[in-house]
Amino acid sequence: MKKILMTICIVFAILSIIPTYTAQASNQSYRHMTPDEVPEEQYEAAGKLYKLGLFREVARNGDGTPNFALNYYTTRIEGLKILIRFTGEEHKARNNNTYSPFEDVKNKDIKYTGYAYNNDMIHGVTRTNLLPNQQLTADFFFTAALQILNYDCGTDYQWCQAWDKTDVIGLTYNKYNEDDKNISRGEIAEILFRMLKQTPKDQELSIIDQLIETNAFHTLVNQQHVKSKKLHDAVKANDKDLIREIVCQIINGAD
């Protein structure tokens, strides 16, 4: 099976006119709306991805529940981390020691950018600058999402109009365009959740089936990313049929 992560092509090479900012501890300093205004579907999507180990919280609420900061925009570097976590291969990025040419990337993020750079995932706005703290925009994110689904930038779609392709395949619904490129963490979670059931171009298995068949959940459990006890126990029992059943329950909201 073609590795999901190797197909990611986050096009950071073109510099958009968007504001820079001083990142807070959570790197979520563009507020999109209040938490109460976030659609319930986005909370549900983030929660299900979180149980599967494919989406992380940025903090803990006072009651101990995960805070996903769904009402905030995010940055290029955080968008990269979100995508790598979604593919189930974050452990490879965190253990990576390959070369990263980007001088504006913080030490704690060099392993991610080095891994991404050496796997043809990202390009900088110059040879040595990524501008990692600029706001992640929809065209950049959709380009990555489409590459995960094995669509080729420049052949199957154009990066500057990637939302046209995501509309056609059902990841988005005519929300994004040249005049509205903003994309929140909640919207990212919702789109990633939709991607789980998508089958990449010219492949036979959906994203979620690929994660199951490649034993990605075994690694996610070992990394303590999986939050569902049922899925954790199924993985420890090495029962692939039970793993598939529990995963389906989580996706359908039955767990």
Image (cartoon, rainbow, N blue to C red):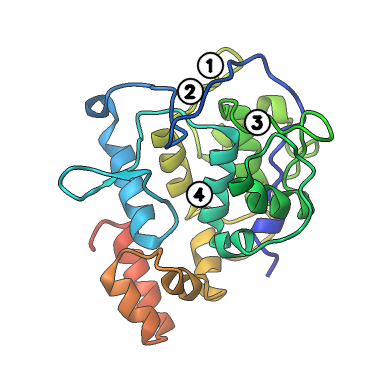
Q: Earlier in the sequence, mark 4 or mark 2?
A: 2
Q: Earlier in the sequence, mark 3 or mark 2?
A: 3
Residue 247 in the image: above or below residue 162: below
Could you tell whether 255 is left or right of 5 in the image?
left
Q: Which mark is residue 180?
A: 1
Residue 46, percent from left and from top: 35, 46
- Amino acid carrying label 4: it is Met
Residue shown at the point (79%, 53%) measured from the top left? 99
- Amino acid carrying label 1: it is Asp
Residue shown at the point (41%, 63%) measured from the top left? 225
Task: Kindly identify which residue carries mark 2.
Answer: 175
Q: Which mark is residue 195?
A: 4
- Amino acid carrying label 3: it is Ala
Residue 52 in the image: above or below residue 184: below
Label pair 4/3, CB-CB below 8 angstroms: no
Task: Kindly identify which residue carries mark 3.
Answer: 162
- Spatial CA span between label 1 and label 2: 8 Å
Q: Nearer the viewer, mark 1 or mark 3?
A: 1
- Which image quadrant is residue 53 in? bottom left
Check disc 1 and report its element: helix, strand or loop.
loop
